[in-house]
Image: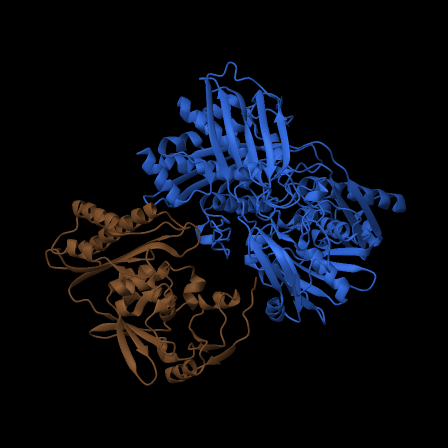
Chain colours: A blue, B brown
Amino acid sequence: MSSITDIVNGKGRFVDDISFPGMVHIAFARSNYSRAKLLYVKGGYTARDFPYFMASAGEGATEEDLSLRAPVLASKFAAYLGEPIAAVTGKNRYEAEDNLDSVEIDYDPLKPILDPVEALNSEPVIPGVKTNIISDRYVGKEFSAGEAEIVLEDRLENRRVATNPLETRGIVAAYDGTKLTVWTPTQSAHSVRDGICESMNLGKESVRVIQTDTGGAFGLKGGVYPEYIVAASLAMKLKVPVKWIETRREHLMASRPGRGVVGNMRIHAMKSGVIKGISGDVIVDAGAYGGASWSSGWIAFQITGPYAIPNAYFHARSVMTNKVEQGPYRGAGRPEASFMMERMIDLLADEIGADPLDIRLLNAAKDKFRSPTGMEIEASAGFMARAFEKMEYRRLARESKPGISCFALIPAVSDGESCRIKVERGRINVWLGGNAHGQRHDLWVAKLLSGKFGVDPSIIELQLGDTDMLKEGVGSWGSRSAIVGANALLKVADKVIAHVKKDKGAYTARALLSGDYDEYEYANEKGMLISFCANLAVADADAAGNVRVSKLKAYYDVGKALVPDVVVSQIKGGAVQGVGQVLSENIEFDQDGQLMAASLSDSGVLNSVQSPDIDVYLEEVPSRFPHGAKGVGESPTIGVPTALVRAIERSAGIRIRKTPVSPEEIVNARSRVK
Amino acid sequence: MGSTPGKFDYLKVSSIRDAVKALSEVENSKVLAGGQSLIPLLKTRIMTIDLLVDIGGIAALDSFREDNGFIEIGASYKVGSLEENRSVSKYIPALHEAAAGIADPLVRNMGTVGGNLSHADPGNDLPPVMTALDAEFVISGNGNQRVEKSDKFFQGAFSTGLSHNEVLTAVRIPRNGGNATSAFMKQAKSSGDFSLASVATVLHLDDDMNCLSSRTVLGSIFPRPYLMKSVDSHLQGKKINTGLLKEINNIVKNGISVESDFFASAEYKRYIASYLVTEALALAYKRAEAGLT
């Protein structure tokens, strides 16, 4: 990958920097409606040319119902605004977009169903199905209200958030008659390959996916998209290289956003503040087709978080609406789960007049605890006490109105990760199955490997993802890379060392660098690696409802911080996304199903001036892995929103049930309280 | 779902006469100033044109001139220059505040005063300020020049009194004699930086700090800047204090008829308009009291 200096100086090599002689550019004709019958489609390349369906690949991939697979190009029915219907090409981007005029689409618009709760019982949002509910599970164990002295209910909601990396989606594809090569920014080159192969029924050996410098991803770039299948198909059909780069408007309407969850929660407690149970409905706005069936059960599974709550029972449903499919967004279910739990704990604290920290400490796990949903955590009480001591909650609570949050981070450790180390001509090249998209994996790779091998870190280079250079791979998501990626790295390094010993009798750095070595391993990993985290926020809402965030703090157990600066930077960046989710980020539709955001600014992404700083405190309790690291990447998007919502709630004297919360909603809620 | 404009011709002119001539010759043509609103419209193909007439090369338009009777700001004067102009921040704080609150430094470094006014986006902030300042709009057309006040210049959302072949070349702000003070405040949409509502007020006070006259203008709520005569007449002859501001708050809240839309309910629009009017009046008056006009 390009060096950080090159990237900062505008000399990175991103997908849009790739150019080949004769390359054509692709533009897409997309549905102008959120729900419409397509009476006819003329011009361009259509589903008649490429009659493919999307495969399930990447983060959250599931065994899916085939009848719910999204078409690569819609032909009879458009199920969401911006759904691709036809593709055109041009010798440059201007010409390709000019050629969109050659596509004629006749629509019969239908009333879109945009609200997931309405969609539970409405007519199907797409033809050919009987219900919009694509996943329907009960999670936990049914329990009776029994001895609980207090039962509180509330409806909580996280609206959808666009992933919005600075670099949008994009792809370059070329076909030499036998092999298709794809260049794309990605979290997982292998997921893109597998997705293309499955959709187009190609053998894995006939497709090579090469990662380009990746300008942020946040879950967006974990899998494969309809546009990628079209690009691959066009490269093979036209036998010239093709390029497609997503515009920001396309990103906001037709790439998979995250969140979009409603929870009707009930908390059962004693007057003392002891929580006896939590129950309710989790309803995920899955969007059109079946891709997001996984997330409702995953949210329900982890709602009890770091608390020892003896009873938990949730009805978890993912329901289709006339919007683009939901996808993973930094946190991917974890922030939604924590929002449900933390909002209900604060509600209970207010009901019985208890301090929010006291009630959390009272319900923290004093020992190992297995939740009714099967989530196993270590004792959390000691961690919580240390966290709020360090963040000076008690002192701050005397002089201001801080909001606090606690959560248990569950990284996506399962299934492990792969690594390859190749030593030749005195240099060491490394490939990982999880592809870095801005997190500086290169730094921990160089640090761990130089320590292990006893060599100068400058001769170690982490390569971009490439399916021809690494046999298998999973991906970079779910706070996993420094855990399972580093684990695979160290295992492969051991193999190399063993190989050197075998060749030369003893291992020395000189012996290593004088030879050629090439080792690979897929380091499988089962089980979970849960860590505890806590946040604190102070904020004020003025008379117009505008929020000023005056203090943010994080106290996270990150295990051993492999590269502390990078850990802190990740927390700072994620905190900005967490604040954005609370204050402004949105991709809302008007009543006709038209999207009201067309730019980064419209969609509420905070700029540097609007971004508060965060004080970061790391607790470094080593994990069970040899490198000692735990997860970190998603933590700020889990803990910052909940703490900040509470801080705003206390400052404004209102109850907040939804993110984002607008100035108008704050003013209106305040006037109702008065 | 474009990111590139459709085909158009581009002409960079070095005089207003050439600009007017080019605009007269091609019906579907448009003046390019800083391009901060026009370029996105073209790139998203919301708008297509045949000819873009770039007036950025007319040096005389990038000007700021102080005279005895008025301040004249050239149409190509940058919003960022306005923000940094010491004369503006000292004598016309409302204009400084409006300029400094527009988008981000990158937009302000490119965006022009003339563009912000001529585009007449209801969410723009210079229209209400220029209206409150009772500015004159200097317009050049086919062989003639005319001057209009804001009531004639702003005709509706994205609509001005400019004919197709006319160019706004400057705005003239009358210099306030005596005790004049001003303030500008806005509420941005909950995401983005365009105003949901804004208020510009210019107060003229006598030696005893009574209001001689005032111009208080509501921006963004309506398609064009709205001069609140009921507020100004209520202020006349009075000192601004908490009691008076309460009355003003009620006058605004009950005096404007607004509708709910995607961005805000009618209730919040009335609330925020009345809040901003009282806050802006209080701020302007405080400035006068502190001698900071």
- Of A301 and A99, nearer the camera is A99
**Is A291 above or below relative to B280?**
above
Q: Is residue B194 left or right of residue A580?
A: left
Q: Is residue A311 left or right of residue B35?
A: right
Q: Is residue B235 left or right of residue A184?
A: left
- Of B14 and A159, nearer the camera is A159
- Of A285 and B90, nearer the camera is A285
Res. B241 in view? yes
- Of B118 and A524, nearer the camera is B118
**Which residue occupies 51% across, 51% down?**
A593
> How many numbered badges does the structure rendering display?
0
**Picture coordinates of residue A216, whole percent (x, y):** 60, 52
Image quarter (top left, top right, bottom left or bottom right) of the N terminus of chain A: bottom right
Res. A547 in view? no
**Picture coordinates of residue A133, whole percent (x, y):** 61, 37
**Which residue occupies 73% across, 55% down?**
A51
Q: Residue furthest top?
A: A147
